[in-house]
Image (cartoon, rainbow, N blue to C red):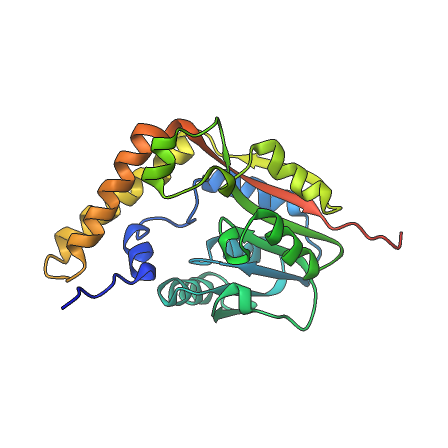
Amino acid sequence: MAEPKLDIWKFFYVTHQFHSVLNPISNTKIDELIELLNLKSQAAVLDIACGKGEILTRIAERYTISGVGVDISPFFVADAKQKLKQRVPNSRIEILNMDGADYKPDRQFDLSMCIGASWIYKGHRETLRALKSMTKPSGLILVGEPFWLKEPEDAYLTAAGETIDDFGTHYENVLAGTEEDLLLLYTLVSNQDDWDRYTALRWYSTTRFVEENKDDPDVTEIVKRVDHEKATYLQWGRDTVGWAIYLFKNPDTNL
C-alpha cells in the first residue's frame, strides 16, 4: 500500500512556523517599502498569495485601506485572519482561501501584490500581466521574484528540481515589467543575511516540529525534504539565487 502523500501546505506551514514574512526579506526593509507606497486614504489593496498576511497587515496598520488577501493554504489563511483581527480589528480586509489564479475580482485595486508566488500565474511576466489587469490606472504593482546571481550549475538545477528558464536575471525581471508598459519605481533586493535567516529559520522550525510531534506520520518525509533543501542551499543555492521585490506603477494612458 502506497504511503499517503505529504500535504504540501502542511509542509510549508511546518517549515515556516517562525517566519512572519514568508520570503527572504527583513521586516525593516518591508517597513521601508510600505512607507514608499504612499497610499491614499481608503485605497483598495489586493494581495495574491498573502501567506500569513504580515505584509497586508502592516500596510493596514500604516494606511486606512480596504482590500482582499487570497491564499490557497488553509493554515496560512487562518493565521492571516487571526493576525488582522488582533492587530487591525476594524480593517475592511477580506481573506479568501482559494487558488489565486481562480480569483476574478469585480473591481480594480490601487495596489496589487504577489510577493514570491509567480508560480500561480506560471511565471514572472504572466504575474505582472495578471496584476496589471486588476490594477487601476496610476495604481501600484508589487511583485517578489527570485533571480539568477550567476548561471546555475547543472548539478544545482537537478538537485533543486529547476530549469534555467524558471528565473531571469535581476535586469530581466525589471525588463519584463517595462516591456509590459509598467514604470519601475523601486527595487528592494535581499542580501545574504536575509537569505540565510529565511533559510536557516526553516531548519530551526522543522527541528522544533519534530521534537514536539514525534508521532506525526509525516515527520520522516518532512525531515528528508528539509535536509535535501539544506544541502542544496549550502552547496549551490546560496551563491546562485537572489531575490527582490519590484515596485511598478501602472501608467494612466489617458493622461
Tell how many labels. Answer: 0
Q: Quadrant of the N terminus?
A: bottom left
Does the rendering let one see residue 2? Answer: yes
Q: Front-most of 151 and 76?
A: 151
Q: Front-most of 223 and 2?
A: 2
Horizontal placement of 87 versus 63: left or right?
left
The image shows residue 136 at horizontal and vertical percentages of: 74, 59
Going by the picture, which residue comes out furthest to the left? 215
Does the rendering let one see residue 183? Answer: no
The image shows residue 132 at horizontal and vertical percentages of: 69, 56
Going by the picture, which residue comes out furthest to the bottom? 106
Q: Is residue 203 above or below residue 130?
A: above
The image shows residue 144 at horizontal and vertical percentages of: 54, 45
The image shows residue 240 at horizontal and vertical percentages of: 42, 29
Going by the picture, which residue comes out furthest to the right? 255
Horizontal placement of 121 versus 185: left or right?
left
- Picture quadrant where residue 113 is located: bottom right
Residue at image position (19%, 48%) is 223
Residue at image position (43%, 45%) is 23
Q: Is residue 226 above or below residue 43?
A: above
Residue at image position (31%, 49%) is 18
Residue at image position (49%, 28%) is 149
Q: Front-most of 166 and 138?
A: 166
Q: Is residue 164 above or below residue 49?
A: above
Horizontal placement of 211 versus 20: left or right?
left
